Image (cartoon, rainbow, N blue to C red):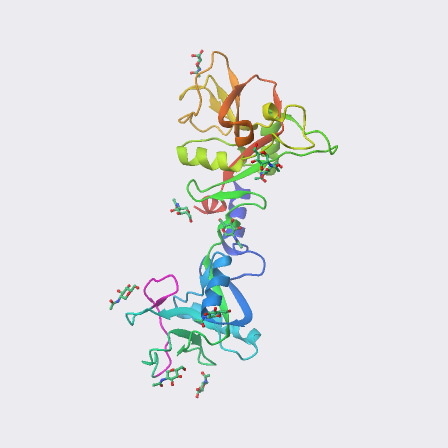
Amino acid sequence: MKTRILFTFLVSFCSSCPHNWYEFPSDDVCVYIIKKSQNYTNAVTTCAQLNSTVVKITNIFENSYIGALLSGLNDQFPFIGVERKSNGTWVYQDASPLIYTNWAPGEPSLNSSLNCVYLGNSTLQWYATDCSTERPSFCSANEMPNHQCLDGWIYSNETDYCYYLENFSYPDNIHWQFYDQSEAEANCQKKDRDSHLVSIHSDAENKFIYDLVYSNVANLTHAVFDPCSHQWAFIGYSGFGFPGNGSWTDGSPVDFIDSQPTPILANYVISNDPSCRLHQWSAIGPDWAYPRYVCKMPSSRQNMK
Ligand SMILES: *[C@@H]1O[C@H](CO)[C@@H](O)[C@H](O)[C@H]1NC(C)=O
Ligand SMILES: *[C@@H]1O[C@H](CO)[C@@H](O)[C@H](O)[C@H]1NC(C)=O
Ligand SMILES: *[C@@H]1O[C@H](CO)[C@@H](O)[C@H](O)[C@H]1NC(C)=O
Ligand SMILES: *[C@@H]1O[C@H](CO)[C@@H](O)[C@H](O)[C@H]1NC(C)=O
Ligand SMILES: *[C@@H]1O[C@H](CO)[C@@H](O)[C@H](O)[C@H]1NC(C)=O
Ligand SMILES: *[C@@H]1O[C@H](CO)[C@@H](O)[C@H](O)[C@H]1NC(C)=O
Ligand SMILES: *[C@@H]1O[C@H](CO)[C@@H](O)[C@H](O)[C@H]1NC(C)=O
Ligand SMILES: *[C@@H]1O[C@H](CO)[C@@H](O)[C@H](O)[C@H]1NC(C)=O
Ligand SMILES: *[C@@H]1O[C@H](CO)[C@@H](O)[C@H](O)[C@H]1NC(C)=O
């Protein structure tokens, strides 16, 4: 329990922003500096590529924090994420209404060709400016989506869990490495105490896992014999293949099954390989081994709750 509390603390206060991003001291907001001067349109594009918007300043503390970062910009005044819509209303770049402003006296200018905003000098006040001027800028984002998962894991915003595919590996450069279900589960558990083979509880989560395990092995050049019957990935279910029966290795309820009941107790694997015409779960014997598996663990956001 202590470990969990410490982890939560680190996540919320020390490291919730990616490398090279700053964090607003009082919020779960990450900030990135674009030193390169470019027009507002290109600033929007650059921030969008980083899954963020041009900086959204929502209170005086954030305004001051951005102000403190100005020193790195060689006296150039940066765009902030405020713009005038064609109906004359000033909004954030994400189109939401301004909940804080710090206009300089006489601003915002009524000149209708000045539809963007830069953060001015020492007073850190806002000035309307032409969007085609070239300036540095800042991006901001709520806690970065990627950062909610460990490196190499993929976040699903629909389930708020992180997923990891152990994909094909060729330790001898020829043959796939194979695992049975208990080895796969043990490997998932080695990644994190909360990590297990994946459990699946909805159509949306099932689709996400199908997308994750997508492969195209029929024409692999240096593959095992009969790659189509060997390319499956373990999921965490063992049972007779109907809801309420059997178990997931993570202990969650068996409330979703994408398979037919089987006459024997089976482990389950999944495939989405068009080259093998496979898009299904499959029941397998207890000791059968396959080259792939999917792990699942709660996102760091869940750990913070
Ligand atoms: C932006 O988000 C997408 C989808 O979540 C992700 O694949 C991509 O890696 C992210 N890009 C950055 C720079 O974080
Ligand atoms: C102007 O448009 C924005 C959305 O683009 C809207 O939120 C705002 O209410 C509009 N303002 C007026 C005065 O129509
Ligand atoms: C409005 O701003 C534009 C761009 O800076 C400038 O060229 C123009 O002279 C301004 N118009 C007025 C009436 O000040
Ligand atoms: C900088 O501040 C001074 C006064 O504090 C003001 O006269 C001047 O216009 C400002 N310059 C810019 C570019 O904001
Ligand atoms: C910004 O610059 C790009 C070229 O880099 C240009 O295509 C675009 O029209 C410019 N936008 C504005 C608002 O000046
Ligand atoms: C998840 O993200 C996608 C793409 O950004 C979005 O369309 C969808 O509404 C989000 N779903 C939830 C539950 O937040
Ligand atoms: C897994 O490996 C296969 C075959 O090399 C590849 O097609 C697939 O894109 C990989 N999947 C991921 C998620 O990297
Ligand atoms: C699962 O189903 C099988 C076959 O119907 C049955 O023998 C077994 O007792 C069931 N297990 C549980 C835990 O319900
Ligand atoms: C593999 O085969 C599929 C159809 O079976 C084809 O669409 C795909 O282009 C092939 N990939 C390679 C790398 O040859």
Q: Nearest the camera: 248 or 259?
A: 259
Q: Nearest the camera: 228 or 61?
A: 228
Q: Residue placed farthest to the right in the image?
A: 172
Q: Would residue 27 be found to the left or right of residue 234 on screen?
A: left
| Number of numbered markers | 0
Q: Residue placed farthest to the top in the image?
A: 263
Q: Position of residue 62 (x, y in %)?
A: 44, 67
Please, what is the dominant secondary structure of the magenta stretch?
A: loop
Q: Quadrant of ligand 3?
A: bottom left
| Residue 36 on the magenta span | no
Q: Would residue 73 be found to the left or right of residue 109 on screen?
A: right
Q: Nearest the camera: 163 or 215?
A: 215
Q: Residue at x 35, y 62 (%)?
A: 95
Residue 252 versus residue 55 in the image, above or below = above
Q: Is residue 25 visible?
A: no
Q: Is residue 36 visible?
A: yes
Q: Would residue 78 be found to the left or right of residue 184 on screen?
A: left
Q: Position of residue 282 (x, y in %)?
A: 51, 22
Q: Position of residue 134 (x, y in %)?
A: 50, 75
Quadrant in the picture for residue 206 = top left
Q: Residue at x 41, y 36 (%)?
A: 204
Q: Position of residue 184 (x, y in %)?
A: 60, 29
| Residue 101 on the magenta span | yes
Q: Residue at x 41, y 27 (%)?
A: 256
Q: Nearest the camera: 215 or 172?
A: 215
Q: Residue at x 48, y 18 (%)?
A: 239
Q: Write down the region rendered in magenta.
A: 91-105
